[in-house]
Amino acid sequence: MQITKDKAVSLDYVLTDEQGQIIDRSDESNLFAYLHGAGNIIPGLEKALEGHSSGDNLQVTVPAAEAYGERDDSLQHTLDRSQFQGVDELQPGMQFHAGNPDGTGMHVVTITAVEGDQVTIDANHPLAGITLNFDVTVREVRDATAEELEHGHIHGPGGHQH
């Protein structure tokens, strides 16, 4: 069976940056599963997997624009320390969930600098601006269940797990 829209796909992968450093990998005892065509994975990888079948191994290079986007300097802001109530120590690298200014959605922000009462945050995805390299092995391709299609994602063994 080939990977097409509305197929449940399980795969193994190793993700590296342009220098070959491992960024992430699937767990050998727990395959990564997603619903193809539902926007569950980055667009460049989804496009590259289209038409492949169980057992296929491929190397995919995904430019930043088709992954987590280019870096956007307008997403860096300096805030007053008082906006981090309940956090005693702030350090570069710490991440927080923040709401959008219009009150919709949540996203992750990363502290990039702390100088006195001024805290600089970056709302870019940590992998924004990075070309990503995937070594992928397709393990299984199956029809998604009606419930998975309705929910827009794959359920684990035994059904609904969220």
Image (tube, helix red, strand yellow):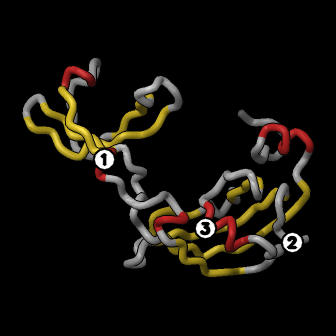
Mark 1 near mark 3, Cβ–Cβ under 8 Å? Answer: no
* Residue tagged 2: 2
* Residue tagged 1: 74
N-terminal-most mark, 2 or 3: 2
Around disc 1, counting alpha carbons within 10 Å, would you say few (fewer than 14), some (14 to 19), or many (20 or more)? few
Is residue 116 visible from the viewing direction of this image? Answer: yes
Is 52 positioned to the left or the right of 44 in the image? right
SS assignment at label 3: helix
Is residue 158 visible from the viewing direction of this image? Answer: no
N-terminal-most mark, 1 or 3: 3
- For the point 53% across and 62% down, which residue is it? 67
Residue 123: x %, y % from top left: 36, 43
Q: Which mark is residue 145?
A: none
Q: Quadrant of the C terminus?
A: top right
Is 53 positioned to the left or the right of 125 in the image? right
N-terminal-most mark, 2 or 1: 2
* In this view, 21 is above or below 117: below
Q: Quadrant of the N terminus?
A: bottom right
- For the point 54% across and 77% down, which residue is it? 61
For discs 1 and 3, the disc positioned in front in the rendered view: 1
Q: Amino acid at mark 3?
A: Gly
- For the point 82% across and 46% down, which residue is it? 157
Around disc 3, counting alpha carbons within 10 Å, would you say few (fewer than 14), some (14 to 19), or many (20 or more)? some
SS assignment at label 1: helix
